[in-house]
Amino acid sequence: MIMACAASGVQAHPHMWIDARARIAFDGQGRMTAIEQDWKFDEMFGAYTTQGLEKGADGSLPEETLLGMAKDWMQALGEPISHYFTQAAMGGKPMKFAAPRDAVVRWNAKDQRLTLSFTLPFAQPIVPDSTGVQFDIFDPTYFVSYAFDAPGAVSMLGAPKDCRQSYRRPRELDWQTMQQLAAIPADAETLPDELLAITKGLTHRIEVSCA
Amino acid sequence: MRKPFVPVLALLLGLMPLTAWSQTAHPFGVPESGGGWGGPDWLSSVFAQVSAWQSHFYRQLTGAVRAWRADGTAAWGLLSLSFAYGVFHALGPGHGKAVIASYVLANRQTARNGALLALLAALLQALVAITLVALMAWLLNATAPQMNRATRWLETASYGLITLLGVWLVWTKAVRPWLARGAMNHRGHVHEAGHMHAAHDHAECGCGHVHVPSVEQVSGVLDWRKAGSAIFAMGLRPCSGALIVLVFALSQDFFTAGIAAALAMGLGTGLTVAALAVFAVLAGSAATRLGAYASAAWMARVRRGIEAVAAVFILVLGVLLLGGQAFLL
């Protein structure tokens, strides 16, 4: 699957839409500890994914089903090539993440939408400098289209007063970049750096800097 | 005399998947198709635009299903969106078009038959999607992973058929004529225009001549036994967009809308591929006409060359697609 993701889907069109939210979490000492995300999937995906699953009278899904879903997704997303579709860097240097935690799936029977929430902690807490920490969220295969459009979709939790956040939506994907993406070798070890270089401006970029 | 092949070859290569593993497994398990296609820059740029449009129409399908359910007269919204989705789906990269174009070239089909093949294959594809969802989701209440698995099987069967079709075409269009020519040369038989009898079929002719029937005679009527294999090879694999819309319609207790949408998508795809098939036929005969400046014998050779190239292309495509399947299993 690693190779499958690397080599393909670059010209795939989004067939999944996610209304996303991201919270950058800090600890008591003002250090950045994690990024928490909620991904609310579109209703076609919701209908397809929940098809045939046993539901309650009110359309709800059993807890075990949702737990299983969260486990499966996090496992698939954990492949190095996907890496939860999330990268972070400070001063051009990629930041290491620890294993994700608190993965939860919720199902809203009324609007037929599934939401995956998870926390991606940094391997070590980070003290952001004035150049800031950059988060890039995107699916390199372009199968998933993210949107951070809701008011307050990007926020900070417990941030020191002098920290500022900004968000920049991706620019349009042009064919030249597509060619470059297509040429990425299917090598999971070296991929993240290369991807970061090529995909400059193609990601949902959240930047947090502290004076 | 090789020159006439160039446009045909370029056309086919443009439709060719660059990598065998182009069928993607995405972290979120939905049956996905396409991606990882090569081709000249201008083609990539066209594909990118086409993808954007396809996505645009796809996203609006849910709203259109709801609108129709709320207002019985609002069916046209969904139908036209689905049709448009189908058109743009067909304009993007995909092996179906490549197979149709090659089959038409290899068998020297008329434009009319090529168009008919394309349309039938696309409609079969829609019917397969409708049947799959009706049987599995509606009657058996299957889950998404089960449906993905069924889709995968159909996909493998489809690629298997393409490979078989390729093997058969390579045998009849490339290997056997070549063997026949060898036998002919051995006997010092000089092949000339006067020798080209019209109505012979290569298969029945054991005399060592290479006969070239005229276009009108070989392809006036569609050979259903042969054409059927091509239609199944392409139509067996349901389009993931159609599957998902069908399941969505089912979840809204409005399966009718899903069926209508799938058929409209099929029609859009079918008509578009039909137009491409007509183009392939025209390109093929243009190439032949170029060859015809030399002599009738040259023309026959150019024809055979095109047929052989198209046949080999189908075989290679089938093997690549099958290889991709094995890789993912």
Image: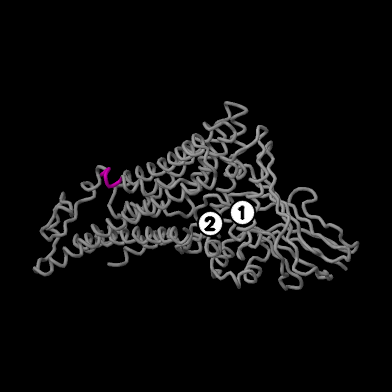
Q: As displayed, is residue B12 above or below residue A132?
A: above
Q: Is residue B19 left or right of residue A149?
A: left
Where disc 1 sits, the SS reads: helix
Q: Residue at x 38, y 45 (%)?
A: B118
**Residue stretch in magenta:** B223-227
Q: Residue B224's quadrant in the figure?
A: top left
Predominant SS along the magenta part: helix
Q: As displayed, is residue B261 above or below residue B328?
A: above
Where disc 2 sits, the SS reads: loop
Most foreground residue, A97 or A204:
A97
Q: Nearer the viewer, mark 2 or mark 1?
A: 1
Does B138 appear in magenta?
A: no
Whether label 2 touches label 1, CB < 8 Å: no
Residue B46 at x, y = what percent? Answer: 52, 56
Does B224 appear in magenta?
A: yes
Query: What is the residue that sits farthest to the right in this orientation?
Result: A161
Q: Is residue A127 left or right of residue B136?
A: right
Residue of label 2: B25
Which quadrant of the rendered structure holds the N terminus of chain B? bottom left
Kindly identify the amino acid type of the residue bearing the numbered disc 2.
Ala
Q: Residues within 10 Å of mark 2 (few under 14, many from 20)?
A: many
Q: Are marks 2 and 1 on the same chain?
A: no
Most foreground residue, B130 or A150:
B130
Q: Residues within 10 Å of mark 1 (few under 14, many from 20)?
A: some
Q: Chain of mark 2?
A: B
Most foreground residue, B292 or A103:
A103
Residue of label 1: A72
Whole-Å distance between the Cαs marked 2 and 1? Answer: 14 Å
Q: Residue at x 69, y 40 (%)?
A: A108
Q: Is residue A211 left or right of residue B255?
A: right
Residue B260 at x, y = what percent? Answer: 50, 34
Q: Residue at x 29, y 60 (%)?
A: B306
